[in-house]
Amino acid sequence: MLTALSIRNIVLIEALELTFGGGLGVLTGETGAGKSILLDALGLALGERAESGLIRAGTDQASVAATFEFDRLPDGVRGALDEAGIEIEPGEPLLIRRRLRADGGSKAFVNDQPVGAALLRELARHLVEVHGQHDDRGLTNPRGHRSLLDRYGRGDVAATEAAWREWRVAEDALDSARAAERRSSDDRDLWLAHLAELTTLAPVVGEEEELASARTDMQKGERLAGDLAELQHLWAGSDSALASLRGAARRLDRIAVEHPLLGEALAALDRAVIEAGEAEDKLARAAEALTHDPDRLDRIETRLFELRAVARKHAVAVDALPGKAAELRAALDAIEAGEERIAELEAAASIAQQTYRTHAEALHANRIAAAIQLDAAVALELAPLKLDAARFRTAVSELPEDRWGPHGIDTVEFLIATNPGADFGPLAKIASGGELSRFILALKVALAEAGGAATVIFDEIDRGVGGAVASAIGERLARLAFGGQLLVVTHSPQVAARGEAHYFIAKASEGMVTRTGVARLDAGGRKEEIARMLSGAEITSEARAQADRLLENA
């Protein structure tokens, strides 16, 4: 709850230090004394637009500091602080400060760490709830009605949110798989054609090098054909050099025993015959390798052209073509596997959708039942607040499937009809200022157990009413404040008498300077202020007696 508010140089306030406690606190004062300034200052601390017009005349900057203390930090506050990287120890107060400069610039701090105004606004959602005659937030905003009804009816929103997330994950996975399958299907025919071409071609690693080498040899053979023919003629006839060597060796063999030198000559001649024989063999092999076969050369060149053309098509080396074929086979296999995977994902998405639908329909039924109970609870509060001709209805409407979301399949809106036979309409549009405030009070009382912000503020909720209605408002505000903190800006003595703490706001002038001050009243001060509210400028003994009765009854 709000425990302290420090204000410097805001409009008519020069310096002000206020402390607050739990229960019902009332703020009173004459019209124009500056009660709205306190709310404007608090709003500045809670992230509302920084207007340079809030700065007191003659000064160049203003500041507001609000201190909140909790037995247990609200989950929403904890989450916002965690996301901003701000640590807070259990039991540590939350201090929010905002400084405003005359040029319109501002700085904000949470526990002395600089933050943006957006964080202040997020914290404000869980810290302070303000209601007034012209309130366009809180209970009048349909965006919050669903969560209020769910808190009231204790609907299992968390299970529905979890089921929604699981369904979205399943649908996203299915969409991704289908998109991949569509892209693959677009390429399937092309991949099949490429694979058929590669399968027919049947490339082998190293084949290009072998074919290129064979083609080179055959092209050399074409150039060397004449020389090879002459060499083979010299080496192959009966009068060839090799035949002469062999004949000489046979003849020398018959006489080699006659002298040692002849034996050595025979050995040398035998070696020459062997070398010449090897030369003949190599010459024959070379001639065979270099044989110019136009048909074979054409086949080799055709094969090389086909291999290299396909390699260019796939932007790979010829030796990589077998791997490319394997890659295409794997891609086509993946398409078949993807079809099976899509079937699995479709089944999973269908199950997730049904799970979500089950939780959402249970939540819908809970909302219908809670709406009936809430309507009855609000109806009980209307007559004492002089709204006995009015009717209240919680409209729970199912959404089309394309608008389902993590919070279920419904929209929820609080509707009212202020006159018999009148149509129901939105709370903020149908009710007048005073009626709206009383409707909000009735709703807050009915929703009290559902919880809400740590601090609730009602701004002149009792304007235009008095007597029994004002007493009923005061009684309900006191009941609503039990166990929490509720601050009320009021003109009603019946409401003021219910306060556990009473703050008097007054405006004083010193020469050309006007200042607003706030004082916490003691018992005697409360009696005098309530008497003033009853009688006006001149406080009578009858007014004091009536103030005593109001305080005693409260």
Image: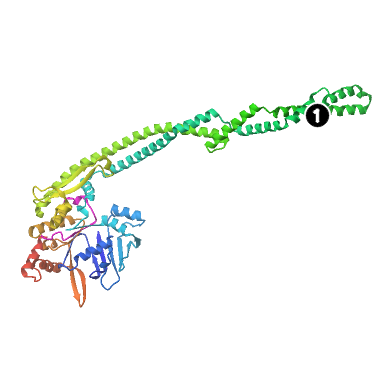
Q: Name the residue beneath numbered marker 1.
A: 275
| Residue 503, placed above or below residue 481 | below
* Image position of 116 (left or right of 155): right
461 part of magenta stretch: yes
* Image position of 277 (left or right of 60): right
The one nearer the camera, 203 or 253, is 203
Image quadrant holding the C terminus, namely bottom left
The one nearer the camera, 247 or 133, is 247
**In the image as oriented, which residue stretches furthest toward the bottom?**
511
Where, by quadrant of the figure, is residue 320 drawn?
top right
Under mark 1, the amino acid is: Glu
- Residue at the spot x=23%, y=66% of the render? 18
Residue 437 horizontal/vertical position (percent): 15, 56
Total marks drawn? 1
Q: Secondary structure at mark 1?
A: helix
The one nearer the camera, 466 or 193, is 193
Q: Please state the extent of the stretch shown in magenta in the rendering.
A: 445-464
* Image position of 421 (left or right of 122): left
Whether residue 542 appears in this view of the structure is yes
Disc 1 crowd, CA 10 A, few/some/many (<14, 14-19, 20+): few
| Residue 501, placed above or below residue 180 | below
Where, by quadrant of the figure, is residue 342 drawn?
top left
- Residue at the spot x=89%, y=28% of the render? 265
| Residue 84, placed above or below residue 368 | below
- Residue at the spot x=9%, y=69% of the render? 536
Where, by quadrant of the figure, is residue 301 drawn?
top right
Image quadrant holding the N terminus, namely bottom left
**In the image as oriented, which residue stretches furthest toward the left?**
542
- Residue at the spot x=30%, y=62% of the render? 96
Residue 199 horizontal/vertical position (percent): 52, 29
